[in-house]
Structure formats: C-alpha cells, structure tokens
Amino acid sequence: MIQAVNNGRQIYLATFNMANDGFDSKDPKLGWPGDLRASEVDPIPSLAQFVKRLEEYGYIRKVDIGKIFAASGVRAYTGAGEFTSANSAFKVYKVRTSDTANVIFCATKNFTFGKGLDKHAVPFGDTSFCVVPQEW
C-alpha cells in the first residue's frame, strides 16, 4: 500500500511538472489531463496517450512506467508494445487547471467516489485504496 501511495505521488509530480511547464511556456501539449483532453492541439483522450505524452516529453522514463503504474494484482507493463489502462493500477482523473485544489487527481482502480469497495476489484480489493488529490 505504501508503494501505491508513492507511485500515485510520482504520477502526480510528473503531471504537476508538465502542467507548470505548459503554463510557463504556453505549450498546449503540456498540462493537466483534463486540459489536454479538451485541447484543440493534439488532444489526449486516453490514459495510454496521457502516459505516452509524459514519456515523450521526459517527465517519466519508459523503463519506469511499469513500476510507477504497478500494484498487486495488476499486470505490469513490460515496456514492449503500447501501455494500456490494463497495465495501470490507477485511474487518472480529468482534472483541469481551473479545478479547485481538493479534486481527486488519481486513485487506485478499486476506488470509486461515493461507492463501497469491491472485494474482487484490483488492486487491493476491499482492504484499502489510494487517493491522490490535485494539490498534494
């Protein structure tokens, strides 16, 4: 569980740095996931494409993707082929620059806001979950 919290924070920090760089440079290809999804320039509609953008711009290394998005029960990304949401223990929410600070940035896949935990969901079933706010 501690590793999942750390991994969620690493995803957040990579995204935070990308969003700050996008704000400073006015590059529409850099930003928060929701801003990139709504962008008129090369929009990012999926987690796989979002992770690819982080990797292409050097915010995460391809060799680290499998470790950062891993957790118990989730098939780890090996670096071969395309990263997919099936290789991720996390859901990354479509947060935007304009959102309030208390929105959820990412959470383990077994967490759904307003619902109880499913004992069959990976990772962690109904024993625990990890939530990372937009402002860590």
Image (spheres, rainbow, N blue to C red):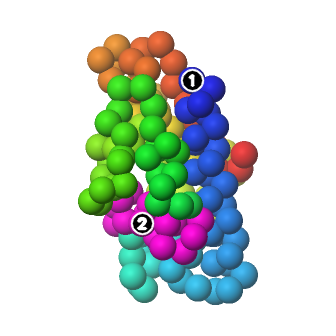
Could you tell me residue 20's position as x and y percent?
Answer: 70, 71
Q: Is residue 49 magenta?
A: yes
- Mark 1: amino acid: Met
- Residue drawn at x 50%, y 38% as measured from the top left: 107
Main structural element of the magenta stretch: helix, strand or loop? helix
Q: What is the magenta range?
A: 45-59
Label 1 sits on residue: 1
- Residue drawn at x 58%, y 41% as measured from the top left: 7
- Residue drawn at x 63%, y 26% as measured from the top left: 2
**Occupied quadrant, residue 51:** bottom left
| Label ID, residue 76 | none
Residue 103 vs 48, above or below: the answer is above
Q: In which quarter of the image is the N terminus?
A: top right
- Mark 2: amino acid: Lys
Label 2 sits on residue: 52
Residue 13 vs 102, above or below: the answer is below
Disc nearer the start of the sequence (2/1) = 1
Q: Does the magenta stretch include residue 110?
A: no
Could you tell me residue 83's position as x and y percent?
Answer: 33, 55
Could you tell me residue 3's position as x and y percent?
Answer: 59, 31
Dot 1: element: loop
As drawn, is 23 to the left or to the right of 7? right
Residue 75 visible in the snapshot = yes
Please rate how many residues cluster around mark 2, counting C-alpha atoms within 10 Å: few if below 14, some from 14 to 19, many from 20: many
**Occupied quadrant, residue 4:** top right
How many marks can you see?
Answer: 2
